Image: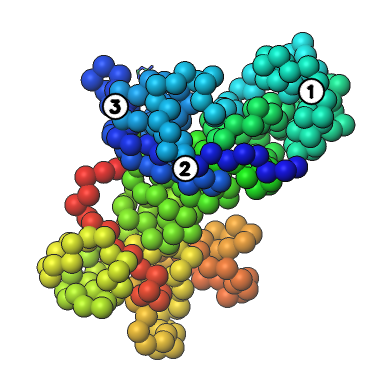
Amino acid sequence: MTQQQTGGDVRLTGISKTYGSFEAVKPLDLTVPQGSFFALLGASGCGKTTTLRMIAGLEEATTGTVSLGGRDITGLPPYKRPVNTVFQSYALFPHLDITENVAFGLRRRGIKSVKKQVDEMLDLVQLGDFAKRKPHQLSGGQQQRVAVARALINHPQVLLLDEPLGALDLKLRRQMQLELKRIQTEVGITFIHVTHDQEEAMTMADTVAVMNGGRVEQLGAPADLYENPRTTFVANFLGTSNLIEGEIVSAGTDIVVAAGGGKLRLPTDRCTAPTTDGGKLLLGIRPEKISLAHADDADAIADGRNRVTGRIVDSSFIGVSTQYVVESPAGKALQVYEQNIERDARLAPGAEVVLHWNPAHTFGLDAAQDID
Ligand code: ATP
């Protein structure tokens, strides 16, 4: 399959949507680089579908502009935009076979000889053997792939995907995530994918925009968002974060924070809170970055690591890791995930422990953020 014609970056400038007095999407600026797999991620009602529909032209923007490759397309009706949308409901025609479903866009444009292009699309989505079946003779995942083929046959410059995997069971969903990623790499056009599933966004997208309350809260590569969340919402929405309240003692290359009955450090460049002495902040640390030592073995912990004492209140073995809940002076119960622990070495509830981690993995958030 040759790469399709690409159309340049999608640029949203001051785009917003208001229903009555309700701002579903607050004015936002966003650039989706050409050829990227871009995810709009957020909880139900955060405005991600509305944003997608404004790009498609299915929803009129209250303010702002949408451009593609520098061309303003804000005023164009959906069918005149070089974009196509795949919805969660596949919206296939039940009485047409798969070939005719995929050929639909070509036929509508008056193109008679469709076989070569349809075959190419069915190969792309690996459904070449199913050309003569009707939609009801296909599985959910296969139907979804037909919907993708049908959307791609007109060579859009951007493919918009609105929760396309929402109706599939978990296992199929995981398979289709990889499949869509493969298809995107093969055709090379921009995919903009709406989902509420953080794992899905992180698996598929090279850039993720995390939306909350009609705003983009943070934008970045999945690993960046995970490792350097800038707000408590992002820290909690993408995976699990331990957030420990603290007060800044001194700020230099490292910030020293009084927290959890001791002093903890974090790199200054990983802190989004104001760094004035005496200022309050939240220290974040991911559960898998923490190690546990029995209190009796605390002397063996290397110098320079952040430490918090605690007592195990719960432990569960979930195959890939052992997950502990630890009560500590750091406030709320802390979560710790440890991998590769021998069965005998697992710590039991009631054990007095020291949690310790590399300060470089700590991030600092503004405790006064008006979100969540
Ligand atoms: P979901 O995952 O549930 O689809 P979403 O993040 O995609 O959520 P949107 O569909 O963009 O959210 O909706 C954003 C907000 O705008 C919601 O609070 C929704 O109720 C509201 N909304 C959407 N369409 C309309 C409409 N036609 N009239 C009034 N309010 C609307």
**What amino acid is at disc 3?**
Thr
Q: Residues within 10 Å of mark 2 (few under 14, many from 20)?
A: many
Q: Which residue is mark 3?
A: 63
Asked if the residues shown at circle 2 and circle 3 are in contact, with their CB atoms under 8 angstroms apart, the answer is no
- Residue 316, given in percent of the width and then of the height, sits at 54, 59
Residue at 12% from the left image edge and 70% from the top image edge: 277
- Circle 2: residue type: Asp
- At 65% from the left and 27% from the top, the residue drawn is 154
Q: Nearer the viewer, mark 2 or mark 3?
A: 2
List the residue tagged with mark 2. 9
Please tell me whether mark 1 or mark 3 is closer to you in this view: 1
Q: Residue furthest top?
A: 95
Label 1–label 2 contact, CB within 8 A:
no
* Quadrant of the frame with the N terminus: top right
N-term mark: 1 or 2:
2
Above or below: residue 321 compared with residue 128: below
The circle on residue 114 is 1
* Residue at screen point 41% across, 75% down: 357
Q: Of residues 197 and 204, which is closer to you in this image?
A: 204
Return the disc, 2 or 3, that comes first in the chain's sequence. Answer: 2
